[in-house]
Image (cartoon, grey):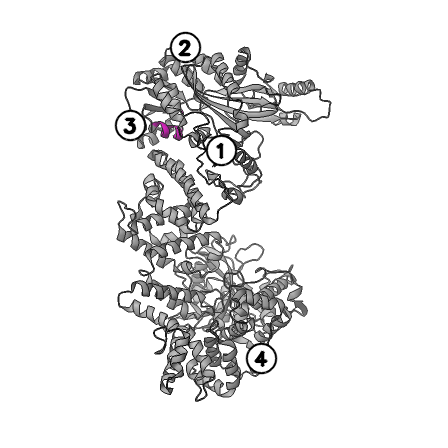
Amino acid sequence: MTSQDASPDDGQSGGDKSVVMRLAVTLDAAVDRLERARPFAKSRYQGPVLDVLGRIIAQPGGLGVVRQRAARMDAAGLFAGSDWDRPEALLPQLVGGTLVSEDPAFQALEAASLARFLAVADGEARHDNLHEEGARHFLTQVLALNLKDLFGVSDEATRGLGARQDVKRRVLRHIADHIGLNDVLSVLVSEIWRLLEQRSVQVGVVKDMIAQIAVALNEKGTEPGSTRLGAERLVSALFGPTAASRDDPGLSVYLERISIADETGLSREAMGFARAMHDTGLVSDYHAAFLIWALDFDQRPLIPEALGLGTTGLDCWRHYRGLIEKLVRSAVTPATPQAAYGLAMLLERGILHHAPMVPALERQLSLRLGGAARDRIALGFGPAVPPETQLLSGVLRVLGQPLGVGQGANPTCQSARAIALWALNDPDYLLHLITQVAEFDTLQMQFEGVQINSADLPVGLAGSGPIDADPVSVLLVAHLDRIYAEMGRHCAGRPGDPHKWINPQFHGWWVSRDCAVAVDVTTGQLDAYDGFLRRFFATYHPDYNGGRPLGHPQPAGIAVTDAQQRFVGWHAIAILRVTEDQTGRMRVYFYNPNNDSGQDWGNGVVVSTSGHGERQGEGSLEFDAFLSRVYLFHDEPLRSSYGQDIPEDVIAAVRDRAIASWAADRQPQGMIDGA
Amino acid sequence: MTDKNPDKGYVALLGWSLNAIDAVDRFDRRYVVVAPPWAEDYCKQNDIPFVPWDFDRLNERSHELAHQLDDMGVDVAIPIFEETVEWAGAVNAVLLKNPRLLGQAMLFRDKSLMKRRAQLGGIRVGVFEEAHDKGDVIRFLKRVNQTLLKLDGDPNDPIHFKAFDKSGTAGHRVIRTPEDVDNIPDEEFPALLESHLDGWEFAVEAWIKNGKIEFLNISEYVTLGYSVFVPATPELEAHRERITEEIEKLIDVFDIEFGFIHPEYFLTNDNKLYFGEVAYRPPGFNALELIERAYGFNGYQGLVLAFDPKTTQDELDAFFPKEIVDAKGHAGCFGVYPRRRVVSRLEIPEETANHPYFEFHELADPREQKVAKRSAFGTHWGLAYFFGNNPHDLRDLLKKQEELDYYV
């Protein structure tokens, strides 16, 4: 037999490229069949094409292959009989959802459709109902609407998607590579500012985005205007925040320049750095270099100016200058510039005046990481600086920005929340835990008098722990996670939700000892829900609790819903305060260990992160909207009656919102009149 | 209906198959689809020439259909499914003024008659018998195994139970024990019983014109009911000459002047060819598509050529490629059955998805999560297609699929 085989004769040999080439040949065979088919028979041959497409788009370089064939596949009838057949009528806001569709055929169809837009936008192909400008505009909107996925911030919803999310990201990247990010700049810039407002401990993703902007500005430039201004503010904060660094001259040139600067010039540098840092929460590499240089500048202290300290911070500086200089010297390096911002915020919180903190930080300075702990930090952050430096930098950032702690792409909201709350509430205790793990690779806690030792426990939810979080989390979460699971095992057999006992034991005395749960744990159905709501009002709403402010942050459980109000999962947050915003509306301000608090939970329940009286790192919702998503909270056990005086219509309004969303299929029979 | 050549034949397709219609619509001959009335709207919307007809049991109305088609100027009817074979025979008897065609079609429709006819014509067949009730089946099972000198308690050699008039593996049961017999529903009788032949099972697709084979394909079964590929391995193709002689015997015995046959054979360990059965219609398992993938010609269009009395020899010579040497590779498919009791989704096994021979699949998403227990050979949930250069690798790959979970 003559064998002009369609496939390369040795399937094992090639890397990715040969796989894509082989799949391209298979795709052509499938498209040939589709092309030949009469219009009424197209549907039969669409499936195989989509099947091959689904496999190609999962390969690096696969989208290029798809783009080259997009116009041909369109003409062959790939979209016949579907909405995608009329590209002029497609809605960009639906693309993101389809790209992560559970049905791989839809994912493939959307990718092929986008490839067609791309081919038209690039002028490679023509389409009767789609012109170059229209195609470009559509793709711009798609990118703008999915920026978060383009750069890889993850949340509960995306974490569950796994490979589907990877395909989506790959498709978005491919589009961005082709049409550039110029058009999406304004969207991107406001998105970055929104993220920065939250002052995350981890800024890698934001820095990536800003670098993208810098490249875009550099390559094409933009029209002058507010977008350009906002973009340049971001780029300069990272790459040239001061007079002497404006042209991004490189560190050695910069150090030369400041070594011959006069005192006014140095002062201007210091203030320039401080302004950019407090403006964005980002620390430029030049800033880090300046601080290290300033340590040995003996004519006058430049550190307080360069950290932009206010009255509290300056007061700390005067008391603890020696310690602070040691912290700068040990923690601020070219690999860990963000330590400077953490330190500034730590000083501004005044926690050095809390007696155990100074010795605890001295201990941290001399701490040597042992065995497994050392390996983990090295694995997570690389060899640029010693693990001790990474950890110290992480400690400063977590203590300076407690609400900036995020869980990374891990199902460990409980542990992340605990770290944040300790940093906020019990900073010396947090340092105590860090020391235990760093030196002994174990954590000891007690559960109702029973000793728990993390080193003796099997791994928990997070396996061996995250490496994509901040250094403190990388060190602690694996241990906390195990302890949390062990406490859960101790609660086995007890009626009700185990968090009732775990939360106080896990976090500390300041978590209220009683606990209300909206659902019956065994059935998952709502249980005495109206009473639950009344109790929450009576505990947290100043109008119904005698005007008492919340003292310590309280763990709470949220039923997270997506923008369509569909239930996504249970999630741990912490209630920080309940108060009126500038317009007099009662709001709950809370901490979400998620990396980005600004989420749309559907039906107008959109978590705000700024503009409604939020402090940095807080999310907020109006009281009713927030309560409609709560399923678990803590309160004091000694009060016996609560909230009887709350009008029924106030309760009903909240109940309706819950039932319209996560509780839709959780209504026990007769619940409406019950409770 | 633009580029149709009025000088060439006008064919009627009996039965609804979108694949067949699509292929014939692309061909150069006028055609009409004869199918149940539910297809009418669809045909109107898509400009498909259509005559509504209910194909129940063949009845006296066959004359009505034949004359309706005759009045339209139709030259010949082509059966697409087993159930329309006798209708095509009846219609063609009128259209071609050859009453013998009806009798011939009846032979193709009854597996028992077919076997006797083959036997009478000197074709080697296995032991077989008609069964009218369960007692017949038990008796046959016992007798076959006594013949094999089995003692009480020895595991039985299986026998095969087949509906007289169903195609493919529909209604086909493998019987080993009296319990298997108990599981046969009464409505499946009468049926044909056959002894089991150990050996190499394969099928042939042959396009015939003027009593002569125009193209003969050998489809090698990897596992009956699961997988098949074309062209066959060189080991099986080595028997092509004998197989061709066997097909010529069939043509002779069944008096086949034109059309398409799809017989099944066994090549036993002692190197003898046993005839299983023959169908006068396109094979299931999308074998025509495999042939198209391998050889590049469309089997349905080949059918039209083979049936149309106005086809010329030049056309035939130009249409059909040369067997084996003109194949671009080996094409195979695997019928997927869920292996677990409860399945929730379709997931192509990774080693399949990454195999260079894997092309694509047409598998249904599991609509119901409960998997029906398979007693008879059931219907698969769709096919996965493979294409490659090395027939042995392809065969092993298809075999391997039986151990993999496509539905989890």
Q: Amino acid at mark 4?
A: Ala
* Mark 2 and mark 3: Cα distance apart in space: 32 Å
In percent of width and height, residue A314 lies at 45, 85
- Give the number of the disc on residue B71: none
* Mark 1 and mark 2: Cα distance apart in space: 39 Å
Placement of B337 over or under A124, stated as above or below:
above
* Mark 2 and mark 4: Cα distance apart in space: 106 Å
In percent of width and height, residue A247 lies at 34, 73
Q: Amino acid at mark 1?
A: Gly
Q: Secondary structure at mark 1?
A: strand
Q: Chain of mark 3?
A: B
Placement of B127 over or under A554, stated as above or below:
above
Residue highlighted by disc 2:
B99
Q: Chain of mark 2?
A: B
Q: Secondary structure at mark 4?
A: helix
Question: Mark 3 or mark 1: which is in front?
Answer: 1
* Mark 3 and mark 1: Cα distance apart in space: 33 Å
Residue highlighted by disc 4:
A360
* Mark 4 and mark 3: Cα distance apart in space: 89 Å
Q: Are marks 2 and 3 on the same chain?
A: yes
Q: Chain of mark 1?
A: B
Instruction: Judge whether residue A589 can be spotted in this image.
Output: yes
- Give the number of the disc on residue B1: 3
The number of numbered discs placed on residues in the rendered structure image is 4
